[in-house]
Amino acid sequence: MIFSDRCIDFWWQNGGVQEPVDDRVHDLSDAFCIVGPQSQAQKISGISTGAAQLRSDDGSTFFELNPSTQKIKIVAPGGLDIVTPLADFSAKVTIHGLLSWLGGMVGSVVSGVASKITGAVEFIGSVKANGKVIDNTHTHGGVQRGGSYTDEVN
């Protein structure tokens, strides 16, 4: 922490050279913090010149704000834990790995198709469509075994 000799309120508000608004000296409210000074013997290498980073000394873990791409990038080899009652995404979400969830899944769409999956889908447990069970326990009424068409699912 570096403490200013005098009150910085007017400078903070207006910039430039200002008269002090208060007689306080060396006050915590007039302090500045310089984060992460390093000696030449242990200086950090590979510092980004295009983005602001909060990172580990070895650069393996970081949070990056990039003004050129207007993206936030998080690299966390040990994982990422987010604890919140609600995470709201306003547009598309792309997941390149396995998607696992434990609390169930609910969704809806105003128009069109709510969900479209390309590739094989395997369900373990009961499956319902429009209130009808369509797993290996469902039956059809009004038919005899053979090549005939069947009635709706019971």
Image (cartoon, rainbow, N blue to C red):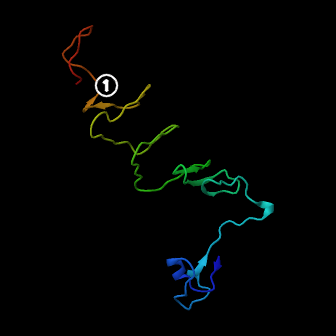
Which residue occupies the foreground of this view, 106 or 137? 106
In-front residue for pair 12/124: 12
Residue occupied by mark 1: 137
Query: Farthest residue toward the right?
Result: 41
Q: Position of residue 149 (x, y in %)?
A: 23, 12
Circle 1: element type = loop
Q: Quarter holding the N terminus?
A: bottom right
How many numbered discs sit on the rendered protein?
1
Q: Position of residue 88 (x, y in %)?
A: 40, 51
Against 94, residue 40 (above or below) is below
Q: Where does the image place residue 49, in percent across and percent down from the top left?
A: 65, 54
Give amino acid for label 1. Answer: Thr
At which x and y percent is residue 122?
Answer: 42, 28
Label 1 packing within 10 angstroms: few (<14), some (14-19), many (20+): few
Which residue corresponds to the image point at 55% horizontal and 87% vertical from the top-left?
19
Vertical arrangement, residue 127 with respect to residue 143, above or below: below
Farthest residue to the left: give it: 142
Q: Is residue 150 above or below residue 120?
A: above
Which residue corresponds to the image point at 30% horizontal and 26% vertical from the top-left? 134
Q: Quadrant of the C terminus?
A: top left
Q: Quadrant of residue 115?
A: top left
Q: Is residue 143 rendered to the left or right of residue 32?
A: left
Determine the residue located farthest toward the front in the rendered image.
Answer: 16
Residue at the top extreme of this rendering: 147
Looking at this view, is 110 or 15 the one in front? 15
- The reply, left or right, for residue 35 in relation to residue 92 is right
